[in-house]
Image (tube, helix red, strand yellow):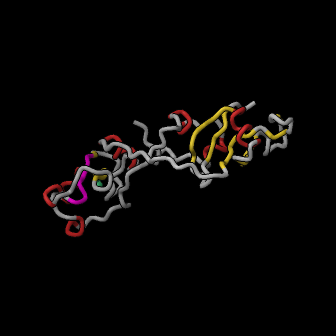
Amino acid sequence: MAREVLVLNSDYEPLNICHLHRAIKLVYKDKADILHYLGEEDSNVECVYDASGLDHPVPLVIRLRFQIKRPRIAARVSRRGIYVRDNYKCQYCGSPSDLTLDHVVPKRLGGKDTWENLVTCCKKCNSKKSDKPLDKSGLILNKIPKAPIYNTSLGFKYIYGASNEVWKWYLPSDEEAIVW
Ligand SMILES: [Zn+2]
């Protein structure tokens, strides 16, 4: 029987993982609804009882009825983090080899060491771009660089090896989830 339940905020953002008993308590108190439960695909449903003796299917994912405000934690900038975010590919030509970091707005023009201004870049594109601004470099960015948000309440193992398939629908992909 699944003992761990993925808890989503009311906007479906993954919040944390809780024990089955806690999840049932939230459902029993009308604070959450069961989105997915054990055996829903093969109709092999097991039941679990709440404090009032009412039975529920064993939840895999529950969603809170109210929105929890949670401070977003910005991940610290690092070379490895930028590479991971960019999937180890040059953001100009897509090459996976000979990688370095490029300042989209060059340092000379006030560009900072931030998630929004650093991209993975191969050495060839890097020397082509030199310290020119993007629009003068003849290069085009594959995508706008953004800071990833890491949800610290979810553990590493859940993101990289979610214990069941259903959770994966709600958890960030490996590319989006950066763990320090
Ligand atoms: Zn390149």
Q: Which residue of the protein is positioned furthest toward the left in this rendering? A: 108
Position of the N terminus, as image quadrant, is: top right
- Which quadrant of the frame does ligand 1 lie within? bottom left
Residue drawn 42% across the image and 45% down it: 73
- Assign the magenta stretch its main secondary structure: strand
The picture places residue 67, in percent across and down from the top left corner, at 59, 52
The magenta stretch is 100-105
In the image, 151 versus 44, the foreground residue is 151
Residue drawn 46% across the image and 47% down it: 71
The picture places residue 113, in percent across and down from the top left corner, at 24, 49
In the image, 92 versus 117, the foreground residue is 117
In the image, 153 versus 32, the foreground residue is 32
Residue drawn 60% across the image and 37% down it: 17
The picture places residue 5, in percent across and down from the top left corner, at 67, 37
The picture places residue 55, in percent across and down from the top left corner, at 85, 38
Left or right: where does residue 83 sit relative to residue 56? Answer: left
Q: Quadrant of residue 20?
A: top right
Left or right: where does residue 12 sit relative to residue 40? Answer: left
Position of the C terminus, as image quadrant, is: top left
Left or right: where does residue 177 sit relative to residue 58? Answer: left
Residue drawn 34% across the image and 42% down it: 76
For the image, the number of numbered tags is 0
In the image, 55 versus 116, the foreground residue is 55
Residue 112 included in the magenta stretch of the image: no
Q: Quadrant of residue 84?
A: top left
